[in-house]
């Protein structure tokens, strides 16, 4: 009887040991598809201009000083904790963002950061680079437009002539 219990114990221990040896995990076709499909469901407009409430090209006129002032106030209240104009901080420097992204992309990022970070390949790459996600500041469309106008204005300035 003792030999049967000993044999059964050895058999169960061997099965547990063998089942715990999983080896290296292989990427399944499903995970390969998920990686390959980032942004595959987006339209050409969304790839260029982001995902959000801005769904068509904006018509921007001359820079509006009142909007710039409002945008600067919003920038100072909501954005400077994570962004600087001329240096990398928690997020990317923003002085030249208008040269790197379309106005529509900027507004969609301001208004819809969660979806942008999940679905847009450029934003996913930024999250991977900065290791942080942008907090939704719950700005209105008008607020986002004011911040965009502020970006348009500061893009014209250089850090040295800004202080003059």
Image (cartoon, rainbow, N blue to C red):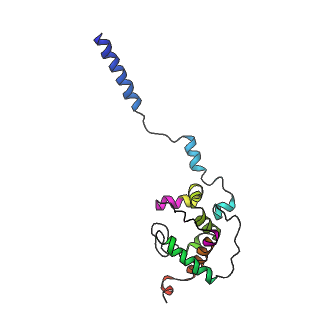
**Residue 96, percent across and down?**
55, 75
Location of the N terminus by quadrant is top left
Residue drawn at x 48%, y 67% as measured from the top left = 91
**Residue 22, percent across and down?**
42, 34
The answer to which image quadrant residue 45 occupies is: bottom right
Residue drawn at x 59%, y 55% as measured from the top left = 119
The answer to which image quadrant residue 2 occupies is: top left
User: Which region of the structure is painted magenta?
Assistant: 125-143
**Which residue is more in the foreground, 151 or 88?**
151
Q: Residue furthest top?
A: 1
**Residue 30, percent across and down?**
57, 42
**Residue 49, percent across and down?**
65, 65
Residue 17 within the segment the image draws in magenta: no
Say left or right for 163 vs 29: left
Q: Residue furthest bottom?
A: 164
Question: How many numbered marks does the figure carry?
Answer: 0
Say left or right for 59 vs 1: right
Residue drawn at x 57%, y 76% as measured from the top left = 151
The answer to which image quadrant residue 124 occupies is: bottom right
């Amino acid at each position: 009887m003792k030999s049967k219990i000993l044999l059964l114990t050895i058999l169960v221990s061997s099965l547990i040991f063998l089942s715990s040896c999983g080896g290296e995990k292989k990427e399944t076709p499903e995970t390969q598809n998920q990686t390959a499909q980032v942004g595959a469901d987006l339209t050409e407009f969304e790839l260029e201009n982001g995902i959000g409430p801005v769904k068509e090209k904006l018509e921007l006129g001359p820079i509006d000083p009142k909007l710039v002032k409002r945008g600067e106030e919003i920038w100072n209240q909501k954005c400077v904790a994570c962004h600087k104009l001329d240096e990398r901080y928690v997020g990317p420097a923003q002085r030249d963002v208008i040269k790197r992204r379309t106005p529509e992309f900027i507004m969609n990022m301001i208004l819809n950061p969660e979806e942008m970070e999940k679905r847009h390949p450029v934003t996913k790459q930024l999250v991977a680079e900065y290791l942080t996600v942008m907090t939704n500041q719950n700005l209105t469309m008008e607020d986002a437009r004011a911040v965009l106008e502020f970006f348009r204005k500061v893009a014209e300035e250089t850090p040295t002539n800004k202080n003059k």
